[in-house]
């Protein structure tokens, strides 16, 4: 059984065949699919699943805190099943591929006290951008 399915079951989430398929499509490392990509992959496993069901299921998973919703590039939102693991994202400026990364150190410590403006800072998010090997190679030609 997938990690995401186990976490959802542990929360007492009613597991229908549609919900199971969406969770299975999302499960894994470095998974950052759009809702339309989730739907396309889910249809391959369960042809009768509707786009609305996929959107609703993703929304429920986000509300439960088991899937994170990302907007890293101004395009479609993406869904990250690794919401329970602290990580940041590395995004290719060329093709948009996203990888989970785990930088050393505490991101909260990186913000000096004189730059906090009295905020009680509780979290930090960093998005690293660059070119993946495929895009970097293509542009070097």
Image (spheres, rainbow, N blue to C red):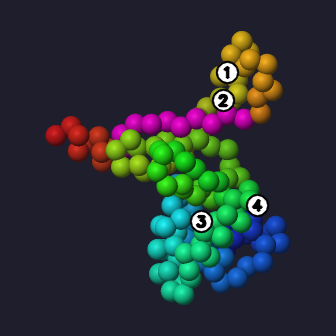
Label 2, on which residue? 107
How far separated are the C-alphas under marks 2 and 1?
Answer: 7 Å
| Mark closest to the chain's N terminus, 1 or 4 | 4
- Crowding at mark 3 (Cα within 10 Å: few <14, some 14-19, many 20+): some
Q: Quadrant of residue 14?
A: bottom right
Please identify, in this view, whether the residue under mark 1 or under mark 3 is nearer the observer. 1
Q: Is residue 131 magenta?
A: yes
Which residue is identified by label 3?
A: 27
Discs 3, 4 touching: Cβ within 8 Å: no
Between the residue at mark 1 and the residue at mark 4, the CA separation in whole angstroms equals: 29 Å
Image position, residue 125 (x, y; %): 63, 36
State which quadrant residue 109 falls in. top right
Question: 45 or 115: which is nearer to us?
Answer: 115
Rendering quarter of residue 27: bottom right
Badge 1 or badge 3: first in the primary sequence: 3
What separation in Å lies between label 2 and label 4 (alpha carbons)? 25 Å
| Main SS of residues in magenta | loop
Q: Which mark is residue 111?
A: 1
Measured in 3D between alpha carbons, the distance from the residue under mark 2 to the one under mark 3, in whole angstroms, is: 26 Å
Q: Give the answer, above or below, for where 13 lies relative to 64.
A: below
């Amino acid at each position: 059984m997938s990690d995401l399915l186990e976490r959802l079951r542990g929360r007492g989430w009613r597991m229908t065949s549609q919900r199971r398929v969406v969770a299975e499509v999302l499960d894994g490392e470095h998974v950052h699919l759009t809702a339309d990509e989730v739907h396309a992959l889910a249809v391959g496993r369960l042809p009768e699943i509707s786009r609305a069901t996929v959107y609703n299921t993703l929304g429920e998973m986000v509300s439960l805190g088991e899937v994170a919703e990302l907007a890293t590039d101004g395009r479609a939102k993406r869904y990250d099943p690794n919401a329970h693991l602290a990580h940041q994202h590395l995004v290719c400026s060329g093709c948009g591929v996203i990888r989970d990364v785990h930088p050393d150190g505490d991101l909260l410590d990186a913000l000096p006290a004189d730059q906090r403006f009295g905020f009680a800072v509780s979290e930090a998010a960093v998005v690293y951008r660059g070119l993946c090997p495929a895009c970097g190679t293509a542009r070097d030609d």
